[in-house]
Amino acid sequence: MSRLTTPAIVLRTVDYGDADRVVTLFTLEAGKLSALARGARKSVKRFGAGLGLFGVGEALLHDKPNAELAGLERFDGARGFPALMSDVAKVAHGGYACEVVRELIPPRQPEPVIFELLVTFFATLEAAPVRAETLRIFELRLLDALGLRPQIDACVGCGTVELGGPGDVLDVRRGGVVCPNCHGHGRALSDDVRRALVEAQTLGLADAPAFTLSHATNAGCREVLSTIILDHVGRPLKSLEFIAKLNHVQP
Ligand SMILES: [Zn+2]
């Protein structure tokens, strides 16, 4: 049994029994793990207000290597995101980021680049209005960090960069765009969407405010990225359905 103090992000909390809470933590040093926080709903002293979604702080864990649940002894929230927490569209985008990260990172494996990306994404949501372009850059950076970067600038079959015709398709299983000569399977990929993704692949979250897509191009990019992400997750994401509903109400 070992004790570990590590920076951590709260990815999910589920109430358990009368007073406890099971939390999914993304820790900097031990990666994703689930932990039982005994008395979490009663002890403000040990868990404070930080032990909720978007909580970023320092976790003190009691861990057994093969136990399904670690024990969370304390969580000291270091950073709050009040503007993020009080805006439904920001909560939707932040919740989606948490869900995708939770689904795609392997358990118990440190992922420092993704840890930093997620905290930076929360900070971006905190500081500025919600923008779809920011989410697209987040998705692309996440896929990169996971080793799932789609190849969009050249055909994955023959390597040609002579793309842009009507026959290009996104072939998720082959990892990117396939030209008409290479017979891909998947949805058609329009050239403006493809070019926007190529550009977005060069950007970081700090570049997001200056990156602007038309409504139609963003919708195409969103389709491409959610197709890739859902293929890896293997099931629908609740948070994505929530964003779709929200967009329907607030076009
Ligand atoms: Zn080809």
Image (spheres, rainbow, N blue to C red):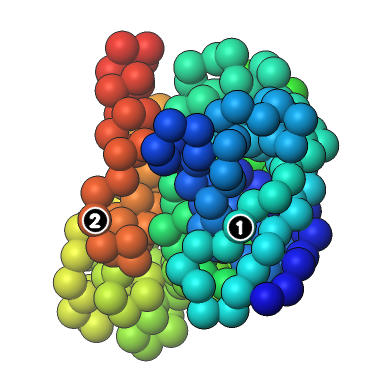
**What percent of the width, then of the height, locates residue 206?**
75, 42
**Is residue 179 depicted above or below 124 in this figure?**
below
| Type of amino acid at the residue the image marks with label 2 | Arg
The answer to the question of whether label 2 and label 1 lie on touching residues, with beta carbons closer than 8 A, is no
**Quadrant of the image containing the N terminus:** bottom right
**Is residue 171 depicted above or below 196 in this figure?**
below
Q: Which residue is mark 2?
A: 235
Q: Is mark 2 within 8 Å of ligand 1?
A: no
User: Dot 2 surroundings within 10 Å: few (below 14), some, or many (20 or more)?
Assistant: few
Q: Which residue: 38% across, 43% down?
A: 222
**Is residue 150 depicted above or below 120 in this figure?**
below
Q: CA distance from mark 2 to mark 1?
A: 29 Å
Secondary structure at numbered mark 2: loop
Secondary structure at numbered mark 1: strand
Q: Which residue: 21% across, 75% down?
A: 184
**Quadrant of the image containing the C terminus:** top left
Direction from residue 220 to residue 93 in the image, left or right:
right
**What percent of the width, then of the height, locates residue 104?**
45, 63
Q: Nearer the viewer, residue 87 or 156?
A: 87
Number of on-image labels: 2
Direction from residue 88 to residue 167 in the image, left or right:
left
Q: Which residue is mark 1?
A: 71
Q: Nearer the viewer, residue 55 or 210?
A: 55
Question: Residue 90, located in which quarter of the rendered image?
Answer: top right
Direction from residue 100 to residue 234 in the image, left or right:
left
Eye-nearest disc, 2 or 1:
1
Q: Which residue: 69% across, 18% down?
A: 82
| Type of amino acid at the residue the image marks with label 1 | Gly
Q: Nearer the viewer, residue 47 or 199?
A: 47
Q: Which residue: 38% across, 81% down?
A: 156
